[in-house]
Amino acid sequence: MSTPDRMHAELRDRAAAFVDEVLIPLEVTAELAGGPLPAADQQLIRDESLARGLQGGLHLTEHGGNSWSHEEWFLVEEQFGRTTNGVSWYIPSAYNVWKAGTPEQVERWLIPALRGELHDAYAVTEIDAGSDPSGITTVARRVAPGRWVLNGEKWFVTFGSVAAVIIVMAYAEVDGERVGTLFAVPADAPGVEIVDDPPFTHNYPHGHPTMRFTDVELTDDDIIGGVGNGDDLQRRWFTEERLGIAARCSGAMQRLLTESVDWAANREQGGARLIDHQGVSFPLADSAADAAAGRLLGLDVARLADSGADPKLVHGKASMAKLFCSEAAGRCADRALQVFGGRGYMRTYTAERLWRELRVDRIWEGTSEIQRLVIARSLERRGVDAMLT
């Protein structure tokens, strides 16, 4: 085994051990509590993830991350995907747009986030702007040199209920034009409020509230990556998030398959093991094919990103990975639930929780329909060979 392969195997095993020893034992506690874990368990996850070097995703070591390659990050996210109830959300992390942040923004927001001292949130979706962000109406108006006033309302702001800073996608009005721009908005700034915190299908630690921004006063120091660069930064964010979803769905499929095979091989019905009945074994075989294909596709995109390939090609292939893995994971969860029978419909069983939780992966960070549009355009513009090799 080569040195990189050994390092990757060590990282994957380290992440897997953390998931098995720390996260999975807390899932049912979180489910029965409706989402949030007790403070002591939250601290345990933060402390253990930091001690084992599993925080920070792709962020630089000097900022508190691990400077992972995309392939290394995929391997870790895959392990986190084996968990339910969002228990991995307590691991210190932060959105990738801080890579474009100023030194002051990195010091104020990113470094504390990667120490587990605060959380950020990302606000892009609006009532009439979902998978298509062109309908965004949130506007930042310059009122004086270096000073802005932000107005708008954002929906489904994941972590919005606990975040110290909200990354807001808005149109900045500059010389009569409107250009996409990201603002780092302190959550405690006057004019920032949560106006709705709806319940959702899954029981996760934090909500996805609706947030309103009314005459929020900001400065040039709160702009991430410069005026007018929001669309490009958001495209990079979508690429990373979609690949992350593919990785986590890959991990979910692995856990579903492992538990289903174990159950079917040890459960007897009608004088034979469940796995000896084709009605059970064939769906398991289909799930194995889905899991293997999805993992290989996701890893291929991660390695492509590491090679410095055209970001637009990586974007198209990340959409392909997200589409396939999220749809495949949904199929695997449904099959697994059926294998477990009545037990599969119990919330204390993994299959039920993943069956419920995986549904959103076909919706957030761009619906499956949006991914198909991105893929079709990439086939036309980048070529079939580029998209398939």
Image: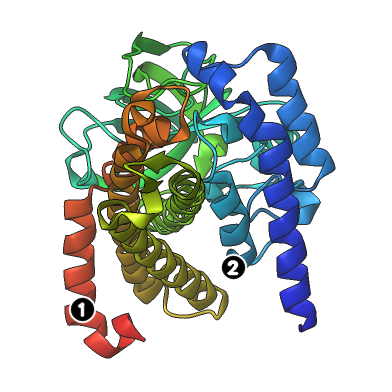
Residue 87 to residue 104: above or below: above
The quadrant in which residue 149 appears is top left
Residue 77 to residue 219: above or below: below
Residue 151 to residue 96: above or below: above
Amino acid type for the residue under numbered disc 1 = Leu
Image location of residue 229, percent across then percent down:
41, 54
What residue sits right under mark 2 in the picture?
71
Element assignment for label 2:
helix
Q: Nearer the viewer, residue 163 or 185?
A: 163
Image location of residue 336, percent across then percent down:
36, 44
Q: Any mark on residue 379, and which?
A: 1
CA–CA distance in space, label 2 to label 1: 24 Å
The quarter of the rendered structure image containing the N terminus is bottom right
- Left or right of 51? Residue 30 is left
Element assignment for label 1:
helix
Question: Quick one: which residue is furthest to the front in this view?
Answer: 271
How dense is the environment of label 1, judged by Cα within 10 Å: few (below 14), some, or many (20 and up)?
some
Q: Nearer the viewer, residue 174 or 150?
A: 150
In the image, which is nearer the foreground, mark 2 or mark 1?
2
Q: Which residue is drawn at the image coordinates 50% and 45% (left, top)?
A: 266
Q: Which residue is drawn at the image coordinates 59% and 35% (left, top)?
A: 88
- Left or right of 194? Residue 102 is right
